[in-house]
Amino acid sequence: MSQPKIKIVVAITGASGSIYAKVLLDKLAKHKEQLEAVGVVMSDNAKEVWKHELKQNDFDKYPFTFYSKTDFSAPFASGSAKYTVMIVVPCSMGTMARIASGISNDLITRAADVVLKERRKLILVMRDTPLSLIHINNMKTITEAGGIICPASPSFYSNPTNFEELAATVVDRVLDLAGIEQKTYRWGEK
């Protein structure tokens, strides 16, 4: 019996760390056979940070459906569309605070609210450091509501040789959490 295909929302905010979003989109494109749909929404700041950090603006060249941050008619703005996973990468502290407070003032926060209320999988890839007590309390609130906080803390035991490989050490964990089958470095396996 084959595993059902996954419907994923990818939200990209204006936090530093566009490399994580790029590597995630690259890897999702390679695993299309496991995906029913991928909807992408980027904040305006995310587009600017992507251009600055990655020195290109090819974010809309991926084979996914892109939505405006104000498009509340996007399918994942409602639980009836049955998107099962939402990944916010990188997730700004402001976006996390709005999600933790239940403020649905754009498509990113509305989709996160929907995923949490439907008891589906919300994965926030935090990149900021250091953390204030407000950040930690917001992480606690989201965790208690069923969300997963997955800090963008790369590992080094696979001996990554460039920025994309280093970012992949985080993204591969995110893909595991999302239920995507993949071949990747695993500690203690050959």
Image (cartoon, helix red, strand yellow):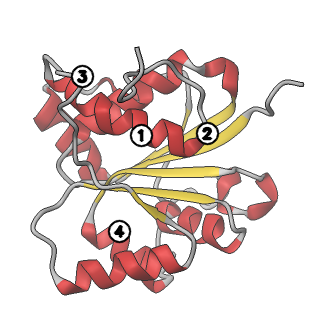
**Quadrant placement of the N terminus:** top right
Q: Whole-percent x and y of residue 102? A: 51, 82
Task: Say what amino acid the circle numbered 2 marks.
Answer: Gly
Along the line of sight, the residue nearer the viewer: 187 or 171: 187
Q: Which mark is residue 111?
A: none
Which quarter of the figure has residue 120?
Answer: bottom right
Q: Whole-percent x and y of residue 188? A: 37, 26
Q: Whole-percent x and y of residue 22? A: 33, 30
Q: Which badge, 4 or 1, is on the more N-terminal residue?
A: 4
Q: Which badge, 2 or 3, is on the more N-terminal residue?
A: 3
Q: In the rendered image of this protein, does residue 91 appear above or below residue 101?
A: above
Q: Which residue is mark 2?
A: 179
Mark 3 element type: helix
Q: Which mark is residue 173?
A: 1
Q: CA distance from mark 1 to mark 3?
A: 13 Å
Q: CA distance from mark 4 to mark 1?
A: 21 Å
Mark 2 element type: loop
